[in-house]
Amino acid sequence: MQAIQLKEQIRNLIELQKIDTQIYALKEEKELRPKEIEEKEKEFEEKKKQLQILDKQMQDLLKEKKDKELELASKEENLKKMQVQLYQLKTNKEYTAMLKEIEGVKADISLIEDKILEILDRIDAKKIEIENGKRELVNEEQKFNTERSKIQARIKEIEDTLINLESQRKIATSKIESQILAQYERILKNREGLAIVKVNNNACQGCNMTVPPQVINLIKMYERIISCEICQRLLYLEEDL
Ligand SMILES: [Zn+2]
């Protein structure tokens, strides 16, 4: 191949690389975006679970309240019976003993009433916590849905752009000699979508390593396309094309 033809091929490769750089970036974005949705969905599900835990705690409190109320009713029933019995007692000793017992039951009732009040306070606090949690969840859901629509729209946009780029790519590859194209494609695949790079200040712009003067001389001879000795990417001198 003559130098003039080789230069033409290199220019075509640079054009192709421009297209491929966009394709690689867009494909990467297209792959990462659904993961963002998944992440957000996970966060959202986590918050839902937290709310379920709060609901369960509320159920437990209501159950505890009911148990205490039953206990209270039974004690009160007991007290009533004792107070009736009190007037049927014959001896002073029995009377004093029953009074003492009644005092004991009254003290128990007072304790249970305190406990019920405490549970009611906890139920009120839990109610507020649940209401806040639900409000937050609604907000989160709206945010999540908005975010998801945005991401889905972006993915659609990427897909459309990719179709366009692929057809540009077809035209670009048709201008490149098959052996050179095969070499380019191989490097493109192995080097994360960057196959041809310029030499800038004697450094390969692919791996940033120094390109020795003898390699630069080889590039300037335009007998064949020269690769970076370190990263294998194809090299060119911008000022020389
Ligand atoms: Zn390199």
Image (cartoon, rainbow, N blue to C red):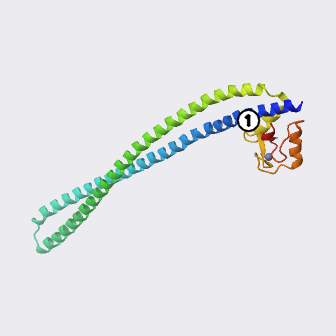
Q: Residue 58 appears at what percent x and percent y?
A: 35, 51
Q: Check the image and name the residue furthest to the bottom.
A: 93
**Residue 19 vs residue 123: left or right?**
right
**Residue 87 vs residue 193: left or right?**
left
Residue drawn at 69 percent across, 27 percent down = 168
Q: Residue 195 appears at what percent x and percent y?
A: 77, 39
Residue 118 falls in which quadrant of the image?
bottom left
Residue drawn at 51 percent across, 44 percent down = 40
Residue drawn at 47 percent across, 44 percent down = 44
The residue carrying mark 1 is 17
Q: Few, some or many C-alpha atoms within 10 Å of disc 1 (few <14, some 14-19, many ≥20)?
A: many
Q: Residue 151 appears at what percent x and percent y?
A: 53, 37
- Depth check, front residue: 191 or 105: 191
- Depth check, front residue: 161 or 224: 224
Label 1: which secondary element: helix
Check disc 1 and give the amino acid type.
Gln
Residue 141 falls in which quadrant of the image?
top left
Residue 93 falls in which quadrant of the image?
bottom left
Looking at the rendered image, the quarter that the C terminus falls into is top right
